[in-house]
């Protein structure tokens, strides 16, 4: 018998975490950071619904913060086992967790500066030292190489979502369970398409875009080219908020190829994020997730991430020099949802300029500045100031790194047999919509509630 309890990213997107009990082992699928209002996030991230010391291993699907970002808390709360993940995830997760500790320490510092009398100071959820202890437990396992915990056999397969992302397959007690982590798309710029797992008794699938149909991926690059050309033609600055991991590499790769075709090379382009600089180096080191075309370019020593044509900025002083530029340029900066990071400096400088453009190239969660801008809200608050929004905000959803509802369905149909599907990792309406589509296609499917346990 295999038991699964759904603890996080259930009827919501962030905080991915599920407990699987199989083959005499207690295995945690992901340990992601829940991102939401401060008090709720502190409560959910700070307290585990099980004693962490009772777990035998963590199986980490990929290095996004909402999947790996609470591992340091788990380790400081007593977890002592291995954290299995692919070697690329091992490198990227170290980067992402260190960045998270830095943001939390800065955030706690800025809240504590504004404390009123009698209010208790806020503590960061974890520190750099906690992150180092979690990194010490990361254990890289290549795609297709099984590891054994108890009598459970665990294998990772390519999920095509970001570098190193994995579909996790757990075989134990005569049952097979599959977990998509986040599922990518089949023809993206950088990655190999998602692998097809073997016959499954249970499939836990993400449902971020359960009721959406993305534009075809091959429209993404031409549309980016059009948006850049139009903005530059009217003398505006192009700002692209992007996660340091994956979306930045997608965009630099697209700009590089557009540059080869002409239009985007007319203006300078900058990647303004120290973390993105490091992440791009990790992409170069791990060709095992990359698609054949990109591998061939790297083997030919081409420059697909534009390290000679795009200026990568680490130092804050150099970042500030962009503020004094009056000519059009392109800047890619974190954070991807405009919640923190250097994108805020660029936005506050250009948000009132009708010639400028903000290009939205990734998922924007509810209650983020990126979502408010995408929804046309004005005025907005940035770094304590109020701004009227006069720049153009343009969404380019074709760049999405998540399979849409029909792409998930097409992928599920390739699996030889699926006993029961559980939809997680989506806002409730999206999870329910995907469940409806799967049910209409003849699958037994449920959207679990938080804390629900199922047995097969
Ligand atoms: Zn992800």
Image (cartoon, rainbow, N blue to C red):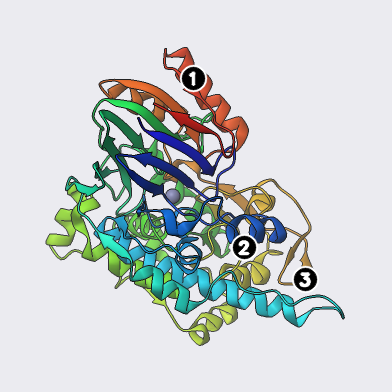
C-alpha span from label 3 to label 2: 14 Å
Q: Taking 106 as reference, is 442 above or below it?
A: above
Per the image, the residue denoted by label 1 is: 437
Question: Where is residue 14 shown, x and y percent of the image?
Answer: 55, 49
Q: Taking 240 as reference, is 116 above or below it?
A: below
Quick one: label 1 or label 2, which is nearer the N terminus?
2
Label 3 CB sits under 8 Å from any ligand 1 atom: no
Q: Seen in the image, is 346 located left or right of residue 134?
A: right
Quick one: label 3 or label 2, which is nearer the N terminus?
2
Q: Seen in the image, is 446 located left or right of residue 55?
A: right
Residue 62 or 54: which is nearer the viewer? 54
Q: Residue furthest left?
A: 300
Question: Where is residue 359 shown, x and y percent of the image?
Answer: 54, 54
Q: Residue furthest bottom?
A: 317
Per the image, the residue denoted by label 2 is: 339
Q: Residues within 10 Å of mark 1 (few under 14, many from 20)?
A: some
Task: Kindly identify the residue that appears in the image at 43 percent across and 45 percent down.
Answer: 399
Q: Quadrant of residue 245?
A: bottom left
C-alpha span from label 1 to label 2: 33 Å
Question: Which numbered dot is residue 385?
Answer: 3
Q: Taking 181 as reference, is 349 above or below it?
A: below
Label 1 CB sits under 8 Å from any ligand 1 atom: no
Asked whether residue 272 appears in the rendered view, the answer is no
Q: Taking 284 as reference, is 442 above or below it?
A: above
Circle 3 — which element? strand
Q: Nearer the viewer, mark 1 or mark 2?
A: 1
């Amino acid at each position: 018998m295999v038991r699964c309890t759904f603890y996080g990213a259930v009827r919501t997107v962030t905080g991915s975490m599920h407990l699987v009990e199989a083959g005499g082992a207690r295995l945690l699928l992901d340990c992601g950071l829940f991102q939401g209002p401060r008090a709720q996030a502190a409560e959910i991230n700070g307290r585990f619904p099980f004693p962490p010391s009772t777990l035998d291993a963590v199986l980490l699907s990929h290095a996004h913060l909402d999947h790996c970002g609470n591992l340091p808390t788990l380790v400081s709360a007593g977890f002592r086992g291995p954290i299995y993940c692919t070697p690329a995830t091992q490198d990227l997760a170290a980067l992402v967790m260190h960045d998270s500790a830095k943001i939390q320490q800065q955030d706690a510092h800025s809240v504590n500066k504004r404390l009123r009398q009698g209010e208790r100071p806020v503590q960061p959820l974890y520190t750099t030292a906690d992150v180092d202890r979690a990194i010490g437990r990361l254990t890289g396992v290549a795609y297709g190489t099984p590891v054994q915990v108890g009598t459970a056999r665990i294998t990772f397969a390519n999920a095509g979502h970001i570098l190193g992302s994995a579909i996790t397959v757990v075989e134990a007690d005569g049952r097979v369970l599959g977990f998509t982590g986040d599922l990518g798309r089949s023809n993206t710029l950088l990655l190999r398409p998602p692998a097809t797992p073997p016959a499954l008794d249970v499939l836990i699938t993400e449902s971020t875009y359960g009721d959406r149909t993305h534009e075809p991926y091959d429209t993404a690059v031409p549309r980016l080219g059009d948006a850049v050309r139009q903005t530059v033609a009217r003398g505006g600055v192009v700002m692209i908020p992007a996660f340091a991991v994956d979306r930045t590499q997608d965009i630099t790769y697209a700009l590089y190829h557009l540059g080869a075709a002409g239009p985007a090379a007319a203006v300078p382009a900058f990647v303004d994020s120290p973390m993105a600089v490091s992440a791009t180096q990790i992409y170069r080191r791990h060709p095992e997730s990359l698609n054949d075309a990109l591998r061939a370019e790297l083997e030919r020593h081409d420059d697909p991430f534009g390290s000679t044509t795009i200026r990568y900025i680490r130092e804050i002083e150099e970042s500030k020099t962009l503020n004094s530029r009056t000519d059009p340029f392109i800047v890619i900066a974190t954070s991807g949802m405009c919640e923190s990071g250097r994108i805020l400096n660029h936005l506050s400088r250009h948000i009132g300029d009708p010639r400028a453009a903000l290009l939205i190239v990734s998922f924007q969660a509810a209650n983020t500045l990126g979502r408010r801008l995408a929804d046309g809200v004005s005025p907005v608050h940035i770094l304590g100031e109020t701004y009227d929004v006069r720049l153009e905000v343009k969404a380019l959803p074709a760049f999405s790194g998540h399979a849409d509802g029909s792409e998930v369905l097409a992928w599920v149909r390739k699996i030889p047999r699926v006993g029961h599907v559980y939809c997680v990792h989506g806002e409730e309406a999206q999870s329910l919509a995907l469940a409806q589509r799967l049910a209409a296609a003849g699958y037994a499917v449920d959207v679990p509630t938080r804390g629900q346990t199922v047995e097969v």
